[in-house]
Image (cartoon, helix red, strand yellow):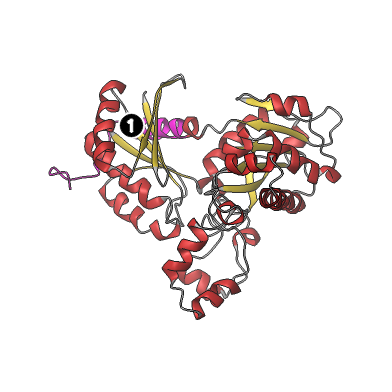
Amino acid sequence: MRIMIANSGSSSLKLSIIEDDDITAKKGNFAIPDRGLLKTQLRQFLQEAGPLDAVAHRIVHGGSLYRESLIVDKEKRAELQSLSELAPLHNPVALEMMDVIGEELLGVQTVACFDTAFHKNLPKKEYTYAIPEDISRRYGIRRFGFHGLSCTWSSREAKKIFHAKNYDRLIICHIGAGASITAVRKGRSVATTMGYTPLEGLIMATRSGDIDPGIIFFLAKRGYTVTDIEEILDKRSGLAALVPGSQGDMLHVLELFAKDDPTALMAVDKYTDKIAGEIAALAVTLSGLGSLVFTGGIGEGSPLIRQLVAEKIGFLGLEIDKTKNFSYQGGTLLISEDSSKIEVAVAEAREDLVMAAEARSLIQSAPGQTAELTDDKGH
């Protein structure tokens, strides 16, 4: 069964074709802003790709409506639209790309895979905010958690390489343009740093992460609109604000760091402080830390960030092998010292394989079902 994986970002659409044996047959990366060019390139990609059994789309926020992957029809597509305000950087673009691809692949099933699903069994004390219950209940305000597809893969990889007693107290650090940390006990999410939206928690590329909510009230009283504040916190904060001119690009920040640029030195110190602090805090929910996985674009790509974080939580008994750490080239690699009390690994994020497996399972459980997103006129 051949599955096409669609991963939509704010400015790019990444596609990959996954064969039955989990081999990646073809990849494509397309710029979204020029819709005309995108459609032309997409048609060519699909012509070269050959027959497909389904397209699986990564949807960042499933809200309270969707806690499992599903086959999308017109009704479900309309319901998904209502969740866009919860993840304004992600969901709207993913749904638009779902429509664009659906118009080119009439009759091919569309599957939605949710980044929130891994956290569906969070304990009540972890998903509950300390705000009036009637408000939480009325508007469905709770912690959802994100990067669940990545956590699913990392958890599976961790189980293969860590000792069982250490795997049972696992923390997964998904660090990329968006970033979150999740505590996993025996394969289940028990606490995570992102909450109601993908804005909470760590310092990210352009997102602020945790701030004093009073700042929002202060700005509102001085004439900033809700849209203004959302723009500031989602698109103009994080590393982009700490290192002006970086646009949140960690590679750029690290280039300046290597030159002892004082702004970059402070930003990296603050960035890694926050990661280390959240790891230590989540260790409390696990009654101690047994194992740690770094994943995501920065988690995989920056041995320096891994080293700095490891040094800051060294008091917990964590030691990484610097040679192994700086030699990582992909896949899953154990990088902790033999003497370390905590096992540490780097894992290549393979959300695509998780999504392909979920799409196959859905299709096999509903043979012959074809869900169209549009009517006969393409509307």
Q: Residue at x 37, y 46 (%)?
A: 94
Q: Secondary structure at mark 1?
A: strand
Q: Is residue 309 left or right of 2 when viewed as pictured? A: right
Q: Is residue 112 left or right of 318 when viewed as pictured? A: left
* Above or below for 112 versus 135: above
Q: Residue at x 56, y 33 (%)?
A: 349
Q: Position of residue 224 (x, y in %)?
A: 46, 74
Q: Position of residue 174 (x, y in %)?
A: 60, 42
Q: Is residue 330 left or right of 107 when viewed as pictured? A: right
Q: Is residue 315 visible?
A: yes
* Above or below for 234 versus 217: above
Q: In the rendered structure, does residue 362 fall within the stretch colored magenta?
A: yes
Q: Quadrant of residue 335?
A: top right
Give the labeled residue for mark 1: 54
- The magenta segment is 355-379
Q: Residue at x 84, y 36 (%)?
A: 341
Q: Quarter holding the N terminus? A: top left
Q: Position of residue 271 (x, y in %)?
A: 67, 50
